[in-house]
Image (cartoon, rainbow, N blue to C red):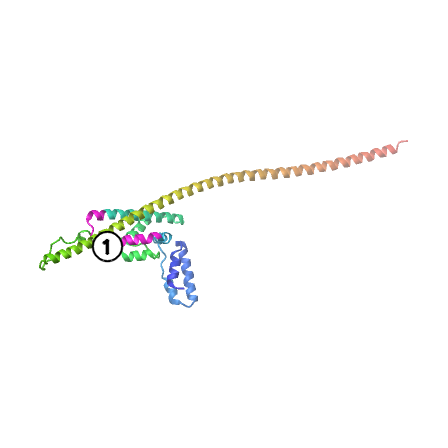
Amino acid sequence: MDLDAVADELYALRPEEFTAARASAVAAARTAGDRELAARIGALRKPSLAAWVSNHLVRSRPGEVEPLLRLGEGLRRAHQDLDGAQLRELSRRQHALIRALSLQARQLAAQAGHPISESVQREVENTLHAVLADPEAAEAWATGRLAKPLSAAVGFPTVAGAVPARAGATAPGRSKPAGKGRAVKDGKADEQRRRRLAEARQAAEAADRELRTLRDGAESAGRAAQEAKQQVERHQQRVDELAEELERARGAHQQARFAERTAREEARAADRRVREAVRKAAAAAERLERLTSSEP
């Protein structure tokens, strides 16, 4: 038993199962004589609902973790060199991707029996924003072991601070370099800028592809949910019909039992009347025989 394995197991559970499973793992570590491990397991925090939803998304859709991490890396690299128009377009795409992922997380949570509110969904979206902006947040999210949602307070640097100096401008206190050296330096800067722009475009295209895939998945999940709802309604209607039929059958059964009791009572009464009639007939026959034998 080690902490990583236990943590992976605990944070894969449903929220209502976490506390009991953690207590069981603590007891097992103590039984094994590892009090330090028991204390570290006991310190693992139960995830909030938003953190559990984020973990559930990572564990249920592992193929979507790496593309989002790559997009975050590309955004963080490219943000320093992109102009305002490109930044706005890339920002629009990243928000669309985050919205699609959060909707998918909400559907997964509902399918797992934990529908979430709008406020919890916003916490999930904030976590995804933090993943794109902060490499440490991205690393924590990718483990699927969040105990609380991540903060999106850490953002990308502003565009103004990322705009390179104009060609030919010199820093205060420095002499203007020779023309050839400046040309070489500017050429390298332009090449680096083109490379970063190309990487940003690739990241944006990957985000678009991922968004289309997520939208298709969300639409499929929505159709599946609608079909499941219709199937539930059909089964509920059938249950109601069977319940009514069962109630009618119970009524008929009770009436049949009452009729059976009545018939048995009438049969017993008829049997008594028959025995009484037989007795009377026998007595009459005996009396007739006596009278007949006493005649001269």
Residue 27: within the magenta?
no
Quadrant into which the N terminus falls: bottom left
Relative to 237, 274 lies left or right:
right
Q: Secondary structure at mark 1?
A: helix
Q: Is residue 293 above or below residue 221?
A: above
Relative to 84, 176 lies left or right:
left
Q: Position of residue 143 (x, y in %)?
A: 34, 57
Q: Is residue 110 above or below residue 18?
A: above
Q: Residue drawn 33% across and 47% down?
A: 213
- Between 124 and 89, the residue placed more toward the observer is 89
Residue 71: within the magenta?
yes
Q: Which image quadrant for residue 221?
A: top left
The single residue placed furthest to the bottom in the displayed view is 33
Q: Residue drawn 37% across and 47% down?
A: 107
Quadrant into which the C terminus falls: top right
Q: Is residue 91 above or below residue 260?
A: below
Residue span colored magenta: 63-88
- Between 146 and 48, the residue placed more toward the observer is 146
The residue that mark 1 highlights is 77
Q: Position of residue 233 (x, y in %)?
A: 44, 40
- Between 254 and 218, the residue placed more toward the observer is 218
Residue 117 seen in the current view: no
Relative to 233, 289 lies left or right:
right
Majority secondary structure of magenta residues: helix
Q: Tag 1: residue type?
A: Arg
Q: Position of residue 38 (x, y in %)?
A: 39, 64
Q: Which image quadrant for residue 176?
A: bottom left
Q: Residue drawn 23% across and 51% down?
A: 198
